[in-house]
Amino acid sequence: GVHRTVFVVFFLRGVTIGVVGASSLYVARACGVPQNFLIATRGVGLTLGPALLGNSIGRAVWSGNSQLFGAAALAAMSFCEVAIPKIVSGALIFPTFLVFGVAIAMLDTFGDVVLTTVHRERCTTPLNIANAFYGLGGMVAPYLVVLAPEHTWHVLALAHGTLAVLLASKRVLRGKPADWKAKVRGEA
């Protein structure tokens, strides 16, 4: 469970970062703002996210609520991805990119924390696999933008939203995983 989810999240993160890079000029022009300001705003979110919410990540993992935390971050990303191509105002695009950056950072940090918590000293291989999935996502992104430029952000929103619903549904329907304490202690 945890590996598949983290690997999918890392793949989607690679796609997301690639899509931002390939399409941010169009977004900036539509909103009438400099592209570098958009990327910098996302960067502020990437920096502030772990700094402000790092303890929440730890609490989510150590309390067995990692699925709900991940679902919330994925839902935030999905919301931003629906909004970004529709926004034509500089005043609205900046807070959206800030929240987008925070959500990306939360998922990135969260994935690292989950893998290192579950695997402890044996975390090298899972982290390398996760980073390989990130790289694959980054390679796919430009093709996605070229093949479906009008729908790229919607595809991302659908992917992140679907994963959020699946994670939250699994948690709500099945409750906490039976072995979550053993996993957190590195015994599973």
Image (cartoon, rainbow, N blue to C red):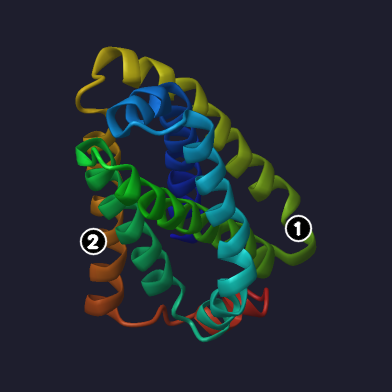
Q: Is residue 166 above or below residue 26?
A: below
Three-letter amino acid code of the residue under disc 1: Arg
Q: Residue at x 61, y 65 (%)?
A: 50
Three-letter amino acid code of the residue under disc 2: Val
- Position in image of residue 184 (x %, y %): 61, 77
Badge number at residue 29: none
| Tag 1 secondary structure | helix
User: Quick check: can you spot residue 114?
Assistant: no
Towards the viewer: 166 or 138? 138
Select label 1 or label 2 by which is in front. Answer: 2
Q: Is residue 88 above or below residue 2?
A: above
Q: Which residue is mark 2?
A: 165
Dot placed on the residue nearer the N-terminal end, 1 or 2? 1
Q: Residue at x 80, y 62 (%)?
A: 121
Q: Kindly report the distance in space between the C-alpha atoms of the residues bearing marks 1 and 2.
A: 30 Å
Q: Which residue is mark 1?
A: 122
